[in-house]
Amino acid sequence: MEDTPMDLAAPGLTRRTDAWAWRLVATGASFVLFGVGGLLLRLLILPLMGLLPGGADARCRRARAAISRSFRMLVWFMHRSRVLDFRIEGAERLGNPGQMVVANHPSLIDVVFLIGQIRNANCVVKAGLFGNPCTRGPVSAAGYISNDGSMTMLERAADVLRAGQCLVVFPEGTRTRPGHAPVFHRGAAAIALRGARTITPVYITVAPTTLTKAEPWYRIPERRVQVHLRVGEDIDPATFNADAPLPIASRRLNDHLHQLFERELAAS
């Protein structure tokens, strides 16, 4: 029996399977929903919520709750449209007062999953989000902290922890390079030692890799993405802060976090 054209392929080419074309359309729709959702929050939902009784703190909590619910809906859409499957372990241990949630950053959607699991979380986000028309309204209303690398940013982040807020931080500052271990900057450790009651690591794996820093949104993998978030054991920052000046303690904690994530992600 002769080979049909569908059976023949040029060297190095493979047929795309697992509903690739549908997942491409659904991925684009996910980005559209993210942008439209951000504009709706900024122009309609948050202004209406601002009319409700309560001061600045109440408005901030409502904004964070709205963002969290929006992200949960986006995750639901991506799952139901078969863009990805996901598994989250230990989410019930997130969102405690004075808790700093530390996570690696393999993909653009990490923050969507994490904030979607914590109703009232503060977050250190990249400064560019405050200039983006789709995101500047929500991130400002939620009181998120701009990651501009200044000492003011470090002190503000420590202040919100001391005030009993839960703070989400990605110590890499940008997405992980595919095939490389995460490299943590010392700023997260400095924030934790200044204000956190506890540090909770969250190990995130995304396979196959997608939406990394080097990949445009339309370069989707050949098969459906599997996202796994696992909440690790709490770390007491006082164990690093007791017998050393702050710069040395920060270096020790940062080294500990780097080694911990490298080990746990390799095991995953």
Image (cartoon, rainbow, N blue to C red):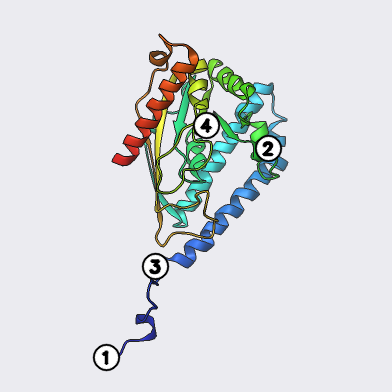
**Amino acid on which the number 2 mark rests in the picture:** Phe
Depth order, front residue of 118/101:
101
Asked if residue 95 shows in the view, the reply is no
Q: Nearer the viewer, mark 1 or mark 4?
A: 1
Q: Of all residues shown, which one is farthest toward the left?
A: 1
Numbered circle sitting on residue 1: 1
Numbered circle sitting on residue 119: 4
Secondary element under disc 2, as helix, strand or loop, is: helix
Mark earlier in primary sequence (4, 3): 3
Residue 73 lies left or right of residue 227; in this view the side is right
Residue 144 placed where, x, y %? 61, 30
Mark earlier in primary sequence (1, 4): 1
Which residue is rendered at x = 52% and y = 59% of the image?
A: 26
Depth order, front residue of 61/85:
85
User: How far apart in space, not on screen, are marks 2 and 4 (Cα)?
Assistant: 21 Å
Numbered circle sitting on residue 130: 2
User: How far apart in space, not on screen, are marks 1 and 4 (Cα)?
Assistant: 61 Å
User: How far apart in space, not on screen, are marks 1 and 2 (Cα)?
Assistant: 62 Å
Mark earlier in primary sequence (3, 2): 3
Depth order, front residue of 52/248:
248
Quarter of the image with the C terminus in it:
top left
User: How far apart in space, not on screen, are marks 3 and 2 (Cα)?
Assistant: 39 Å
- When asked about the image quadrant of residue 60, the answer is top right
Location of mark 3 (residue): 17
Vertical arrangement, residue 136 with respect to residue 2, above or below: above
Residue 34 lies left or right of residue 231; in this view the side is right
User: How far apart in space, not on screen, are marks 1 and 3 (Cα)?
Assistant: 24 Å
Q: Residues within 10 Å of mark 3 (few under 14, many from 20)?
A: few
Do callouts 1 and 4 mark residues in contact (Cβ within 8 Å)?
A: no
Do callouts 1 and 3 mark residues in contact (Cβ within 8 Å)?
A: no
